[in-house]
Amino acid sequence: MLRLMPSRASLRLQASSPNPFSFFRLGVREVPKCPFCGAELNHLVVHELVCTKHAYKVHSNGQWEWQYDDEKGREYTVFCPECYEEIPLHNCISDVEDFLDEEYIILRSDDPEIKRKGDLALFRGKVYKVIDESDDGLLYLELVEDETVADIIGAGLE
């Protein structure tokens, strides 16, 4: 399902208005890092390409008559704001927020902060399941939600 992206004006409004629940995470929340330059990221840059077909009926007297608009598709590309490398999210729209919340992360397999055993990994005290490993050495990790299981696995990985 395709979610519509908020307008630039609404993004500016959201950025300027404080989140009443943000105090719960102050001092506790780690920010994700770019798998390429290692910069800690508090935001991402998303480019959206919208392809739309506009159909008109053109009369011999030069009059143009609008018929319909047909949106053919959207493409999203996510970039690191520091090094401007493309962050290859599997499903760009749904994964952007999960990436910023570190529920879904992408790391280089040789990252010194990661401890890995089979298809499980420990990163910054959280346990992740390896969901994919690309040929260029990137690990796609998803947070293990069950805290009890994560604690047991985390103890074994440390």
Image: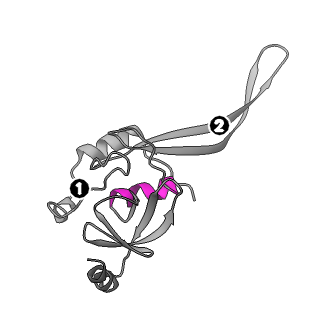
> Percent x, y for residue 102?
33, 62
Kindly identify the residue that appears in the image at 25 percent across and 66 percent down: 124
Q: Nearer the viewer, residue 115 or 5?
A: 115
Q: Which mark is residue 66?
A: none
Q: Quadrant of residue 123?
A: bottom left
Name the residue beneath numbered marker 1.
Answer: 19
Q: Magenta residues, as a range? A: 90-101
Give the Cα distance between marks 1 and 2: 35 Å
- In the image, is 86 to the left or to the right of 146? right
Kindly identify the residue that appears in the image at 34 percent across and 40 percent down: 81
Q: Which mark is residue 52?
A: 2
Which amino acid, mark 1?
Answer: Asn
Kindly identify the residue that appears in the image at 37 percent across and 59 percent down: 110
Of the numbered discs 1 and 2, the one sitting upstream in the chain is 1
Q: Nearer the viewer, residue 123 or 14?
A: 123
Q: Where is 157 relative to 45, above or below?
A: below
Q: Secondary structure at mark 1?
A: loop
Which amino acid, mark 2?
Answer: Thr
